[in-house]
Amino acid sequence: MSTPINTILSWFETGDFPTQEQFAASWTSFRHKDESIPMDQVENLNSKLQEKVDKTVYNTHLINEDAHITTLAKLNASNLNDANVQAWKTILGVGDLPANIATVDDGVNSGNVYTKDQSDENYMQNADFVGADGKILASMIEALGLTELISVTETSLSAFMANNVAYQYEKNDFIAIPNGSGNYALYIYNGGSKTVVSSYLPTGLTNITIAMVEGLQAALNAKMDKPSTLGNFFIRSLGPGPIYASINPAANYLIFWDGQNFKESNMYHNAGKTGIGITDPTELLHLDGRVRSKAVVFDENTELLPNQITLWNRRFHGTDLTGNRRMLMYRDYEDYLALIQSLSPIQKENIATVWNGQYSNGSLNVYSITPTVIKNDHVVRYLVLQGLNLNVNPATTSVKFIPVGSAIGTTEVDCLGFQPSADGKSMIVSVYGDTLTANTQYNVIIRTTSPVVQTHRTTSNINVVTNIDSIDVSAINWQRIAYTSGQENTIFTTNGGLFSYSSNPANKAYAYEPNIFVAAIKSDTIFPANSNFYIEFNVGLSISGNQAISDVFDFYAYLGLVQSNIPLALSDNSFIRIINSCFRSGAYISTAMWNNIISNSTKIEPGSTPVMNANIVIMRQGNVYTQFLTVGGATIVQTVTSNTDAVSISLAVTNGTTPKSINASIVQAFKF
């Protein structure tokens, strides 16, 4: 309910204090901005809306073609009567069309004259047939239909007239009758009977001479006479006239140019084979003589023909009279070393016996033995002896163990085997731990009988113990990283000292990417800083694929030791390692392992088998690391110096084109 405005104003006069009820009554007397005003409360609104036309009615009126039909003309004038039409003409000033007005076709009505395009289609353009001088162009005479040349087969006019029905010709057409010698007699048909001679006018052009044809003599002078006899010729000289020289080698001989003539050479082609100096070649190219060339490129060839040089499996081979093949050597160290490595132990010993210069004649000296402690169990232990002149002849050398304090020649124990280094600075000695007495210290005795006789007893010793400071490998924990996050547990399996890797395309699609690391793991700290240690692994590597010659294989896995403080990453951070790989080698897929440094001298490649097992031993004494890699009966030993930091085990794997897996286990690990 509203309150009159004067009443509200009286409540707010100076000095007055409105009550709560008066304040509320004041505000409820006005409309708030958010309130809508009802239509029935707007004065005269309904009456004004009644004066407006309905919108639907108005829109219907707008589209009604018959609205105002009696007062307005339609767009198509369909509602105009004759009176309306006449009125429009009068207003527009348009009278009746004259009877002689010209009209053209409009697609519906036919006119009484041609358009320009219709005229161009029916008539020829003057400029197309008349030259600048106003005369008809000779080339357009036939197109104009003024004349036509009729070539006939009859050789006389009378014969042609008798057979005129076989030809269509009209007045002013030319009739060309051959005379049998290459010329024609020309007649013009002037109308009349086609069987009457008088209807044909002779032109007199029956025998055309060279002089009668403009430029013909000059054109003929530019031509050459052909040889008077049959054969193959070349033009030796033009001069005043061409001189033709015969090309006539004996059958099957290739020709050559001697500066004057084409002559037969000493190359003979017979049954798809070519001989040089021989007419019965037995090979695709057969030479009766020597060959000299800057280079010869060989393709892979496994043939075993007598007296043949071939390239096979990345090596050159030569065969003797019986086809027996031998490999040719390159003149370099790598090939010579590879030859020696391919020999059996007995063959090496036989060569060494003959060639004593391979071995040292100097005094033996051993100044250190690694490791200094071994366990008394039935496991092969590898000891590294370092010193001078240790490149002894195995055929005339013995290595034995003797208890410290025992007299030479008493209680000596043979080693399992030994291998001297070529530089004479180290020797690897192997022995079963249980062949030596527990809780005993041993020296090593080296005896030689050739090239000089000498006996050397080491001052360093080895402690043989029942128990050693072993590392509990079952408690080892591992960190893992994969190319695709979330795949770590798919590609890696770890259980203490056991760990394995299996490639998976969900981690990274197989591809030729030998430099892209797709997985890596790192163990807890295995050995603390400044400790001497021994650790031994067994590793198995396998790959799969079609093994076709066209396949591409190239993949690397790095297993070794890394400083414990280096974070795990998709990279190889190990400072001493064994490198596992597979690649295309000759005609087969090959697996290989390298001992830390990638080179032929540190590589073991067992052949075409795609599966390889290896034994790895790494020892540290001070800052000297010694690493043994054994595959089958082959062993490679490497010694390097590095830091003495705490170390962990690491494995980093690159991508490749085919699936592969790596299985590894720690055989034993201990400090000494």
Image (cartoon, rainbow, N blue to C red):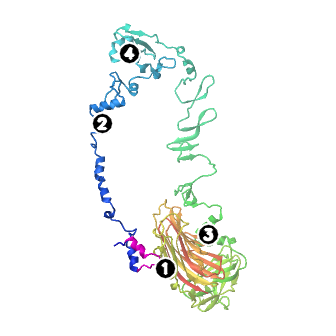
Q: Disc 2, disc 1: CB below 8 Å?
A: no
The crowd level at tag 3 (other Cα within 10 Å; few <14, some 14-19, many 20+) is some
Q: What is the residue that sits farthest to the top in this orientation? A: 198
Q: Closer to the N terminus: mark 1 or mark 3? A: 1
The crowd level at tag 4 (other Cα within 10 Å; few <14, some 14-19, many 20+) is some
Q: Nearer the viewer, residue 191 or 298?
A: 191
Residue position marked by numbered label 4 in the rendering: 154
- Looking at the image, is mark 2 or mark 4 nearer the viewer? 2
Residue position marked by numbered label 1 in the rendering: 494
Q: Closer to the N terminus: mark 2 or mark 1? A: 2
Q: Nearer the viewer, residue 629 or 525?
A: 525
What residue is rendered at 55% in x and 38% in y? 253
Residue 258, numbered circle: none
Q: For the magenta stretch, what is the residue range?
A: 4-19
Residue position marked by numbered label 2 in the rendering: 77
Q: Is residue 13 magenta?
A: yes
Q: Closer to the N terminus: mark 4 or mark 1? A: 4
Going by the numbered disc 4, the residue's amino acid type is Glu
Q: Spatial distance from mark 4 to mark 3, Cα to Cα?
A: 98 Å
Q: Is residue 467 magenta?
A: no
- Looking at the image, is mark 1 or mark 3 nearer the viewer? 1
Q: What is the residue that sits farthest to the right in this orientation? A: 362
Going by the numbered disc 1, the residue's amino acid type is Thr
Residue 661: horizontal and vertical position, in percent?
Answer: 48, 72
The crowd level at tag 1 (other Cα within 10 Å; few <14, some 14-19, many 20+) is some
Q: Spatial distance from mark 4 to mark 1, Cα to Cα?
A: 108 Å
- Looking at the image, is mark 4 or mark 3 nearer the viewer? 4
Q: Spatial distance from mark 2 to mark 4, Cα to Cα?
A: 75 Å
Q: Disc 1, disc 3: CB below 8 Å?
A: no
Q: Please give left or right for residue 464 compared with residue 163 in the image.
A: right
Residue position marked by numbered label 3 in the rendering: 601
